[in-house]
Amino acid sequence: MRPRQHMEDSHARLERLTSMLRRRGVILPAFEIHGGVAGLFDFGPVGGRLRRRLKNSWLEHWAAQGDIVEIDSPTMTPESVLIASGHVGEFNDYMSECNGCGGAFRSDHLVDDIHPNPDILTNDELDGIISEHKITCPTCSAVDWKPARPMNLMFSTRIGAMKGGRSAYMRPETAQGMFMLFPALYRHFRNRLPFGAVQSGKGYRNEISPRQGMIRLREFNMAELEYFIDPEVEPIHDFTKWDTIEFNLVPDPDLGQPIKMNPGLASAKNIIRHPTVAWFMARTWDFLVEVGIDPARIRFRQHEGTEMAHYATDCWDAEIHGSYGWIECVGIAHRGCYDLAAHETATGDTNLRAWRPYTEPKIIDKNILSGNGSVIGPIFKGKSGAVNTALESLENIPDEMPFNLVLDDGTTVIIESEMVEEKRIQNTEHGEWFLPHVVEPAFGIDRILWHILDHAFDETEKSGESYTILRLDPSIAAIDVAILPLMEKDGLEVMANEIHQKICGIRNLASYYDGSGSIGRRYARADEVGVPWAVTIDHESLQNGSITIRRRDDGKQMRIQQNDLIAALVTNTITDLF
RNA sequence: GCGGAUGUAGUGAAGGGGUUAUCACCUGAGGUUUCCAACCUCAUGUCACGGGUUCAAAUCCCGUCGUCCGCACCA
């Protein structure tokens, strides 16, 4: 007998895992009978519930913080929203194709060295620069380019069936929904920062070549949190809970070397530049470990300056190691006030701000020059309004008359003493409106789910045979308990079915009944999809109502009363029985 | 999007111009079995899709779609 597990490479393991996921109805390619579509997957009878449990765990994890609420907004988003957010520009890259080798490249990357800001160029301008400077192909060095073509990674559609409908896209992220709802959130939280909102739902990106299974999808499940803070208030976070836990931190190579450090210290040493970012990194770590990610295979990597998304001022990815190497599964970005400011500029709406009261009211007590309308009007005519505005905004009143006054449009006028009157005004300002900053943890649910499965997929041996156990955390396992009559006769199957029905009738619990095949085979089936508990009904059960419960992870069994089983399931205390 | 490989039951594979398309596991029924993939019998289910060549196509050709590997892209 050979120690096979040592010889197996990770690729073979990956194939066995995906085969199992298809065979057992966890994750399957979508629309397969119509030929399938790359980047789209179905969650099957086991996967559907698994994903929902994961999503619920995520929502509950953040709701527990107390200042975070859940919202839900449309996936279909008008174009103007995504122009304001920067997505239309960002997701609208031009591609140039080489006639020599057929390679395709981002047009703006080709002219990076020549133009300081190639992002803003049109396709004609890009083509002009490419031909003028005889740009060579990075692959084959040919100078023979097809015209630049736009490649939009968002799915476009129209809202409105008739002509004149409004351009729209399927959202590439859920975050914009939280920004749109900022005024409602602000009211809900009684005008007090900080607060947050979460949303979990579908996002869409028309990827060029979706590969790597669940890692890059065209329709995917995301879960995002926007946490709004006042940039002038020093955040207070208690990191003592994580004092003994060292995170794997990989800073921007320009800033430092990879280190292991607890989040409190990393924040204090300014390795993580904002305490609230550090706080969400720590809370993210908690979540990932809670749902069954191996803590040793989590690391946080800081985005490099060039890699940072267009809005982020500091960004750390939580990466998880699995069959595809290190994969970004969570992005925790300090976005500053980018989004709210962008929407304010685009719409002119002033409700995206928060009020910051001064500790002491500011009393404005000053002398100003007030224009004398009956003099200014006839002299400056159309310009009189601008003259008045300029006078009012003068910081210092000139000592001498006449003087030169510069207007907003740049022109200068001469002000004579009879045109103005000096006045003393008094104003009390109690605070100011400002754009909140936002820290955004964004989770790729599918990627996390993939790694949960990857880490839980345990190929062991049992009496010389290979044996698979999916060691899912009971809190997210799709099925809580398998109900197995020892044999399907003598009424054992009747009692088993009654227990099955009873458990399925309890909220948030799921059981399945399995009566076919030998008892060992049925244990194996349950182990393979990660059912944490199996209940067996035998002849003794018929006599005294007791059943045996078996623990997935070690096969250990206990005999308890049927009613105690159900009580323990409801209170989630089965583990205490062992 | 480019180049290469490839597509056969739920999974993994064999075959290949005329077959009732093969095998293992899986799944289901019956038997057996009082607890960890046992055994016996039987059964369900497959040539990605669309064209073409041919008397005849799962097999050859073309296209589409999918998958895998590189490149590129994305993050």
Image (cartoon, rainbow, N blue to C red):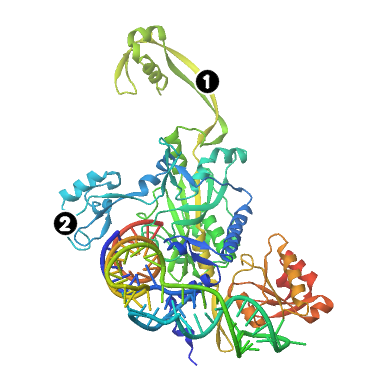
* Dot placed on the residue nearer the N-terminal end, 2 or 1: 2
Query: Which residue matches tag 2?
Result: A143
Which amino acid type is shown beneath numbered disc 2? Val
Residue at the far bottom: name it.
A1
Residue at the far right: name it.
A544
Which amino acid type is shown beneath numbered disc 1? Gln
Say if mark 2 contacts mark 1, CB within 8 Å: no
Q: How many numbered circles does the render carry?
A: 2
Camera-nearest residue between A273 and A146: A146
Q: Secondary structure at mark 2?
A: loop
Camera-nearest residue between A81 and A431: A81
Residue A303 location (% of width, % of height): 40, 57
Question: What's the residue at 74%, 75% (across, down)?
Answer: A493
Q: Is residue A33 above or below residue A202?
A: below
CA distance separating discs 2 and 1: 70 Å
Q: Secondary structure at mark 1?
A: strand
Residue B5 location (% of width, % of height): 31, 74
- Of circles 2 and 1, the one toward us is 2
